[in-house]
Amino acid sequence: MTKKLLFVLTILLVVAFGAMAADISGKWTAEQPGRNGGAPRVTTFTFKVDGSKLTGSISRPGRGGDPMVSEITDGKVDGNSVSFSVKMTMGGNEMVVPYKGTINGDSIDLESTMTGQDGTPRTNKMTAKRATT
């Protein structure tokens, strides 16, 4: 009887831990310093979580102030870890930018890596905060 009870309790704990994937659904914003001391650049993330699957979009300032919107692909949430990719077109060139991050309550520490024009990878770090509006 005790073995059966322990077995059932273990199964319940495993299910509970699986259900604890952070729900980051909604809008998040990250501010980064502008070029040459200019106005800060604000990137808006709109996340949709379904189980461990993450979808949504990213909106960031483009040339001339018009927003550039990209869909999130290959998104995953695993506990407090998040990862996704964004396909961007810049100057007629298409690139996929991977993001990974750590969820800390109402903030997410994110890191993205892009290949620069000279072929070297460039890492960008930012902290997104849950939007209140």
Image (spheres, rainbow, N blue to C red):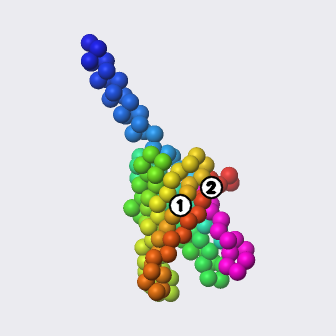
Instruction: Tell me if 12 is positioned left or right of 121 in this view.
Output: left
Between 118 and 107, the one lying in front of the other is 118
Instruction: Tell me if 126 is positioned left or right of 82 in this view.
Output: right
Q: CA distance from mark 2 to mark 1?
A: 11 Å
Between 37 and 76, the one lying in front of the other is 37
Q: Residue 28, located in which quarter of the rendered image?
A: bottom right
Q: Which of pointers 2 and 1 indicates the residue nearer the eye? A: 1
The residue carrying mark 1 is 110
Tell me, for residue 129, which label it has, or none. Answer: 2
Looking at the image, is mark 2 or mark 1 earlier in the sequence?
1
Rendered residue at 68%/52% (across/down): 132
Q: Residue 98, located in which quarter of the rendered image?
A: bottom left
Tag 2's secondary structure? strand
Instruction: Pinpoint residue 93: horizontal percent, then vertical percent.
Output: 44, 84
Q: Look at the image and tell me in which quarter the N terminus lies.
A: top left
Instruction: Pinpoint residue 118: horizontal percent, then vertical percent.
Output: 46, 86
Amino acid type, label 1: Leu
